[in-house]
Amino acid sequence: MTSIENVIQKIPQEATGPLQKKLTDILLKSKKGQMLDPNLAKSILNNYHDNDLKSPEGFKTLLEAAVSLEKEKVAEKMQELNLNEAAAQLGGN
Amino acid sequence: MRLQPNWEETKLKFAVEFVPQEAYWKTTYYAMLAEKSGYDYVWITDHFNNRNVYTALTNILNYTDRVKIGPGVTNPYVLHPIGLAQSMMSLAEMAPGRVICGLGTGDKTTLDMVSIPRNKPLRTVRETTQIVREITAGNRLTMEGKIYQISGVKLNFKIPDPVPVFIGAQGPKMLALAAEIGDGVLINASSPKDFEPAFIHIKEGLAKADKKMGDVEVVAATAFSVDKDLEKARQAAMPVAAFIVAGCPEPILGRHGIPVEAAGEISAAIAKGDWGAVFSKVTSEMLDAFAICGTPETCIEKINNLKKMGVTLFITGSPIGPKIHKSIELFSKEVLPHVSD
């Protein structure tokens, strides 16, 4: 099991919607956009085109991308949503 | 073959303009968001110091299904018109009927940086338009122009229809030429004070070609910023307004009652990179003259005013808002429903 999957396990299903919006914001506001892995970038675009960013696969891609660029900001947003276990898991990765 | 597009629908159409200064995937994401939000066109600006416009457009075509796209605008000085025609045809092969060639004379400041003189802009645009039209129509072109000489050129592939050419214009002669030979006139302005005289010159150009309003798309290429917070919307528009004022011809400054000295001070502050001074010198009058910015209600009123004047396509140009994706969503939800009928 990958570390991102460990983090996802700590996120209740009902929290994925609100967190997905925050992850998108983090990615679009990031100043490190050009450092995003091209395969992750393509996966985000493919999922967005197919309206699948909310699917488990789309959410995983967003989370992986956001963590790769802005790990601390992702942890902050998780804490704002009271996803403390997920934030802690992220910190331990 | 002369393309006669059907621009006669009365419904106001909407475009968004992106500057490809962020990672390619972000610009593509924004373009998809614009399409999902109800926009009709996506324009990508063309400056050699940003990402390449054709690479950006190719990727956008790969990820969108409906919006029309094009360089907004390119110029025939950096890329020869035959290369431009080839690029347009290659894009149109990917998405027939969805590609528009936005053409202008380029930004003098950036052309100066690479020692490319902006010679004979009117003649250059006229001949480039002819080249793009003939080549994208699949014709073999021989041309003895004053600028370009072309001998029996035909590309080795075809597209179903020639690519329409929209011409960016600000001065009287270019506005008239754009209306005379273009499929669309891209007017770089945001205020009715600039559109009133523009329409006079557009009508002159149309008359010369025995065309009428409705035969060309009349496009408002605005500096735009929308946010629920009025001050945030206006703050976001300040840098763009500052650059417009700094490079604005004296007659246009005069039309808006802006002293030439004030524009000179902003220009000097930009040259020094003193952004604090730049922003302190941009006045409310400047913002209102050179940008459409504010709350959704303010933007609705200003867009409807331009529609009443005869604008048929409205471009929400840079900066779009304090946060691009949030402003596109806000525009879609709170502006579009009140201006698109």
Image (cartoon, coloured by chain):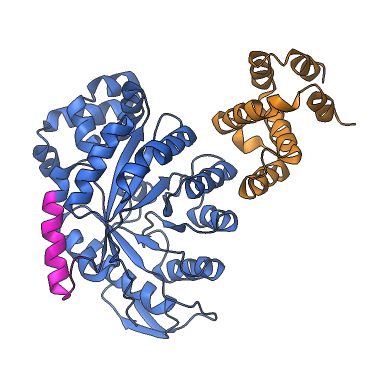
Chain colours: A orange, B blue
User: Which of the 4 image quarters holds residue B40?
Assistant: bottom left
Q: Residue at x 23, y 54 (%)?
A: B311
Q: Residue at x 46, y 45 (%)?
A: B49
User: Which of the 4 image quarters holds residue B254?
Assistant: top left
User: Which of the 4 image quarters holds residue B29?
Assistant: top right
Residue toward you, A17 or B126: A17
Relative to B304, is B47 on the left or the right?
right
Q: Is residue A10 shown above or below A37? A: above
Residue toward you, B128 or A24: A24
Question: Is residue B270 visible from the viewing direction of this image?
Answer: yes
Most frequent secondary structure within the magenta stretch: helix
Q: Is residue B256 shown above or below A73? A: below
> From the image, which quarter does the N terminus of chain B lie in?
bottom left
Q: Is residue B142 shown above or below A2? A: below
Residue toward you, B179 or B117: B179
Relative to B339, is A23 on the left or the right?
right
Q: What is the magenta range?
A: B196-213
Q: Is residue A51 shown above or below B71? A: above
Relative to A23, is B108 on the left or the right?
left
Q: Position of residue B228 (x, y in %)?
A: 37, 26
| Residue B272 on the magenta span | no
Q: Position of residue B143 (x, y in %)?
A: 33, 82
Q: Residue at x 56, y 67 (%)?
A: B94
Q: Residue furthest right?
A: A1
| Residue B199 on the magenta span | yes
Q: Position of residue B64 (x, y in %)?
A: 55, 55
Q: Position of residue B37 (x, y in %)?
A: 47, 45
